[in-house]
Amino acid sequence: MPEAPTFAKFYPLARQGFAPLIQRWRTHVTATDERSLMMLVDTARIADLGQPPVELPAPETLVQWASGERDDPPLWLLKALLFLIVQMPSRPVPDSAAEQAAWAYLWLRLRPWSFVDDACRALPEHLQGVLSDALPIGWQDMQAQRL
């Protein structure tokens, strides 16, 4: 049986990168997990990144998502994380293929894009080279109605 197209593996790889993204957030933010969740909820609401629940998730849940103990982080939370992390002065970048896929997946989900080139050009400069391979694969995945 021939190997599946590269894009067929994109979403599972992106899901593997969610926990490292959350962990990266936790290491770059000096706030408590409770305060961090409040910032993410406020960001999601203000930036229209999804509708967080009325009741905050427990701080322990953030820890579980970051460790991979739970693999169900909500999309609003992940989008808010990426929205904020790409703006950090420390300019964090993904360290693995899974993180690159997660960042690309979430970047493509932050807003509607007409073309993949638009999404690539809108990336902060420090991420353009890092995500240059993952974004087109994520775009192809999205166009295949997988995202």
Image (cartoon, rainbow, N blue to C red):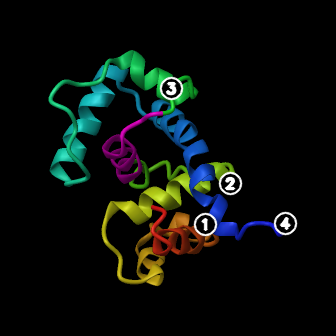
- CB within 8 Å, label 2 to label 1: yes
The quarter in which the C terminus is drawn is bottom left
Residue 9, image x, y percentages: 66, 59
Q: Is there any visible trace of residue 92 in the rendered image? A: yes
Sequence order check: which comes first, mark 2 or mark 1? 2
Q: Which residue is mark 2?
A: 97
Circle nearer the N terminus (2, 3): 3
Q: Is residue 63 above or below residue 25?
A: above
Tag 4 or tag 3, which sits nearer the N-term? Answer: 4
Callout 4: SS? loop
Near-viewer residue (123 or 74): 74
Q: Which residue is mark 1?
A: 134
**Residue at figure coordinates x 53%, y 49% from the top left:** 92
What residue is shown at x 36% (from left), y 46% (from top)? Answer: 75
The reply to whether discs 1 and 4 touch (Cβ–Cβ < 8 Å) is no
Of circles 1 and 4, the one toward us is 4
Please state if 135 lies on the left or on the right of 95 as rendered.
Answer: left
Q: Main secondary structure of the magenta part?
A: helix
* Residue at (54% x, 64% y) in the render: 127
Q: Nearer the viewer, mark 2 or mark 4?
A: 4
Q: Which mark is residue 1?
A: 4
Q: Which residue is mark 3?
A: 70
Vertical placement of residue 136 versus 72, above or below: below
Residue 122 picture location, percent across and down: 40, 74
Q: Secondary structure at mark 3?
A: loop
Measuring from the top left, give residue 95's x and y in whole percent. Answer: 66, 49
Label 1 vs label 3: CA separation?
25 Å
Magenta stretch: residue 112 in it? no
